[in-house]
Image (spheres, rainbow, N blue to C red):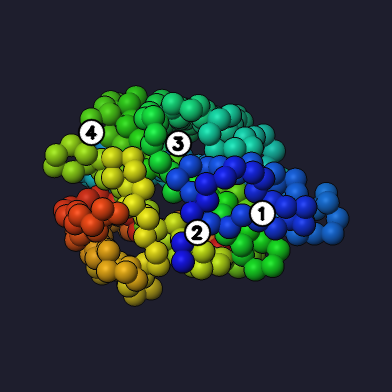
Amino acid sequence: MQTELTQSGPLLDAHGRPAQVGWSRQPLLDANLENARFYALRPLQRFRLKRWDYYAVFSPRRFFSATIADLGYAANVFVYTLDFERGELHEEGLVIPLARGVRLPRGSSEGETVFANAKASLRFTAEPAARHVRVEWPGFHGGLGIDADIRLAVPPGHESMTIVIPIGARRFYYNTKINCLPAEGRVAHGGEVEELRPDTCLGSLDWGRGVWEYQSFWNWASASGFLPDGRTMGLNLGRGFGDLSRATENAVILDGRVHKLGDVGFDYTSGEYRRPWRFRDDAGRLDLTFTPFYERVARTNLAVIRSEVHQMFGRYNGWAVLDDGATLEIRDLVGFAEEHQARW
């Protein structure tokens, strides 16, 4: 059963539990994280709350991503870019004790997400009709630097894949993912400047808030691209976290409309990530083969925080059945699929 939410209201009730559980096409709930009740002592709550904004852009040449994450006892700020033509990945990250200098907004639809110090400056601005991603990191990649100024348009009525789920008795996850946002602007790196155009470049947002288990595992798959007829087509698939009985985050997004899926299996072999992955749902509406062409490995080991990500970039091929029963053929859609293990 997939429960679609249609009413606005608070995220958490007076006991710190999700007031509603399900999925929605827009973020309807107020993220009243001050109601979290993981610890008896209220001042300790912040150390278990996880909050992040992750932006990504696909262009014909590259994948670009920037993240500001507050993990409670520390923040993680990182930027990476993969040049598809050259097969070159460059990544830099900062761990900020107690998340000093990090500011994240209450909701996903408006406000500013900010981090700045002597090394780097990241600012994400959310407005109803657009998102603005600004990154200035002079020392990135050994001093070659990276400078990004990107506007992601949010067309009227464009839908998101939003879920609210419990994780055990005292934990929860509130997440909004928006695919296929037309991107324009530029990414300058290593003396080269790539101009982004909305007819060839698309961005996405992963906005998350919640209290997770200290030791966590999840899979995530995502893509934003164009069909031969010019329509935008996106994928968002996930599993491995929380109680998904009333809501998964699985969907096909066609021209800004969510076509909701139920449970989707990730058929792959952990440790052999370069082999093809298979994705099939429980209702016969999705059958995809994902063929990787590049592996990004990101490891963090800082005592309290430990994580390992295997993010595979590749191409999706197969089909999906839309809400109206039509079959959508998917050919060489560039995206990623990942395995993530964390202690955080």
Is residue 186 in view from this perspective? no
| Separation of marks 3 and 1 at Cα, in angstroms | 43 Å
Quarter containing the C terminus = bottom right
Mark 4 or 2, nearer chain start: 2
Mark 2 or 1, nearer chain start: 2
| Separation of marks 4 and 2 at Cα, in angstroms | 35 Å
Check residue 3 in the rendering and tell me which mark sits there, or answer none: 2
Circle 4 sits in a helix, a strand or a loop, which is it? loop
Q: From what the image shows, is residue 116 above or below residue 319?
A: above
Q: From what the image shows, is residue 303 above or below residue 253?
A: below
| Separation of marks 4 and 1 at Cα, in angstroms | 40 Å
Q: Residues within 10 Å of mark 1 (few under 14, many from 20)?
A: some
Q: Amino acid at mark 2?
A: Thr
Q: From what the image shows, is residue 209 above or below residue 297?
A: above
Check residue 140 in the rendering and tell me which mark sits there, or answer none: 3
Residue 26, image x, y percentages: 48, 42
Q: Residues within 10 Å of mark 2 (few under 14, many from 20)?
A: some
Q: Amino acid at mark 3?
A: Phe
User: What residue is disc 1 on?
Assistant: 19
| Separation of marks 2 and 1 at Cα, in angstroms | 13 Å
* Residue 214 picture quarter: bottom right
| Separation of marks 4 and 3 at Cα, in angstroms | 26 Å
Q: Amino acid at mark 1?
A: Ala
Residue located at (42% from left, 61% from top): 238
> Would you say the residues marked 4 and 3 are in contact, meaning their CB atoms lie under 8 Å apart?
no
> Would you say the residues marked 2 and 1 are in contact, meaning their CB atoms lie under 8 Å apart?
no
User: What residue is disc 4 on?
Assistant: 200
Circle 3 sits in a helix, a strand or a loop, which is it? helix
Residue located at (50% from left, 59% from top): 3
Residue 46, image x, y percentages: 74, 49
* Residue 274 picture quarter: bottom left
